[in-house]
Image (tube, rainbow, N blue to C red):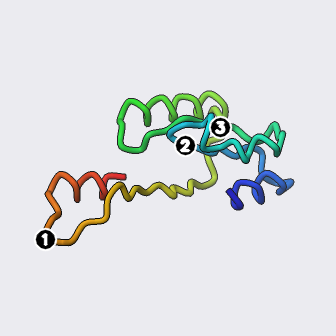
Amino acid sequence: LGLVRRLVQEPSVTAVFATAKNIDTETADLNSLNSPKLHLVQLEVGDEHSIARAVNKVTGIVGTNGLDFIVNNAGICNQMRLADDLSKAFVMEQMEV
């Protein structure tokens, strides 16, 4: 959140996209910025359809100007397990996010 706040304040930055699984609850702190530069986008990084929707939304805003950079800070930790208790499916889910 701190990076988003800082980028929104930067005069040379024209658009900032903040993503979250649930933009209503997970980005509430950003609503106070009231910046026309800030765009909140729903994104589940483990879901191909969600990724496609996010790409379409961002593309609709930036058009042919494209993006200068992306910071992907996604992660999950649903359960703490010992290495002996890890299934392949569990490890793959962690890595895909």
Q: Rounded to the nearest whole Å, what is the CA distance between mark 1 and mark 3?
A: 39 Å
Disc assigned to residue 40: 3
Q: Position of residue 3 (x, y in %)?
A: 69, 60
Q: Identity of the amino acid at label 1?
A: Asp
Q: Rounded to the nearest whole Å, what is the CA distance between mark 2 and mark 1?
A: 32 Å
- Callout 1 environment at 10 Å: few (<14), some (14 to 19), or many (20+)? few
- The numbered mark, 2 or 1, whose residue comes first in the sequence reads 2
Q: Would you say 95 lies left or right of 30 here?
A: left
Q: Residue at 14% across / 58% down in the picture? A: 87
Q: Residue at 43% across / 32% down in the picture? A: 50
Q: Position of residue 20 (x, y in %)?
A: 55, 43
- The numbered mark, 3 or 2, whose residue comes first in the sequence reads 2
Q: Are the residues flagged by discs 2 and 1 in contact, CB closer than 8 Å?
A: no
Q: Identity of the amino acid at label 3?
A: Leu
Camera-side residue of 12 and 28: 28
Q: Position of residue 73 (x, y in %)?
A: 51, 58
Q: Quadrant of residue 57?
A: top right
**Residue farthest bottom in this picture:** 83
Q: Residue at 65% across / 37% down in the picture? A: 40
Q: Quadrant of residue 37?
A: top right
Q: Rounded to the nearest whole Å, what is the CA distance between mark 3 and mark 2?
A: 8 Å
- Classify mark 3: helix, strand or loop: strand
In this view, the mark in front (2 or 1): 1
Residue occupied by mark 2: 20
Residue occupied by mark 1: 84
Q: Identity of the amino acid at label 2?
A: Ala
- Classify mark 1: helix, strand or loop: helix
- Classify mark 2: helix, strand or loop: strand
